[in-house]
Amino acid sequence: MSFIAKNIVCVRNNRILFRDISFSIKPGELLQVVGDNGVGKSSLLRIAARLLQPESGEIFCSQQSLFYLGHALAIQSTLTVKENLLFPYNDTFNSVLKTWSLDNDLNTACGALSQGQKQRVALARLQLSNATLWILDEPFSNLDADGIVQGKQLLQSHLHRGGMILMATHYKLSGIGYPLSVLKIPLNQRITDN
């Protein structure tokens, strides 16, 4: 099981965001994508999740089990925390609720939660998933210090079980306890007509 991207090119609004991006991720590995605003980190993740078609290049994924957590958290504001998680009420579910400090908000509509609490709901959903490959776009945004610690522990646990992570952030991740690779996307230039 591995994930491979070869020679990925992304063009948006007649502008090359990036070209010839290649990388691979194996079980137990985390690849962190970094770069300035607007360089295409989110676009690369959407291409990896097959939500966006690249201009050229190929994606090879020997397994189909992936979980994509983007900027839009896919949290339904009219549903409760429990309804958004859509999992049976069992010991694992209770443990995850406690981990993310959501046990007192189980029947609260997500529209009434803060952005940080919504991020916790999204990460709880991630923790409950069985996906091998996690594609995460700024997963710790809106979290307080305790939430970031919990998030790093979640990443460690997933890697320890042989999971793979492709993750975009604006800063270099530290304190994971696992080796991680960093892919920096440089700024590119506009396409010119010749």
Image: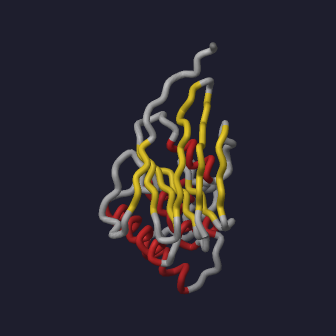
Residue 164 on image: x %, y %: 52, 66
How many labels were placed on the picture? 0
The answer to whether one can see residue 8 in this image is: yes
Q: Quadrant of residue 99?
A: bottom left
Quadrant of the image for the N terminus? bottom right
Q: Is residue 100 above or below residue 89?
A: above
Quadrant of the image for the C terminus? top right
Residue at point 59%, 61% (across, down): 3
Say which of 158 and 58 sits in front.
58
Residue at point 58%, 21% (across, down): 191
Q: What is the basis of the colouring in this image?
A: secondary structure
Residue at point 63%, 47% (across, down): 47
Q: Quadrant of residue 69?
A: bottom right
Say which of 22 and 122 sits in front.
22
Residue 129 on image: x %, y %: 59, 71
Residue 101 on image: x %, y %: 42, 70
Q: Is residue 137 above or below residue 149?
A: above
Q: Is residue 163 above or below residue 43?
A: below
Q: Quadrant of residue 185?
A: top left
Residue 174 on image: x %, y %: 31, 59
The answer to whether one can see residue 77 in this image is: no
**Furthest residue toward top:** 194
Lateral position of residue 60 relative to residue 174, left or right: right
**Furthest residue toward bottom:** 91
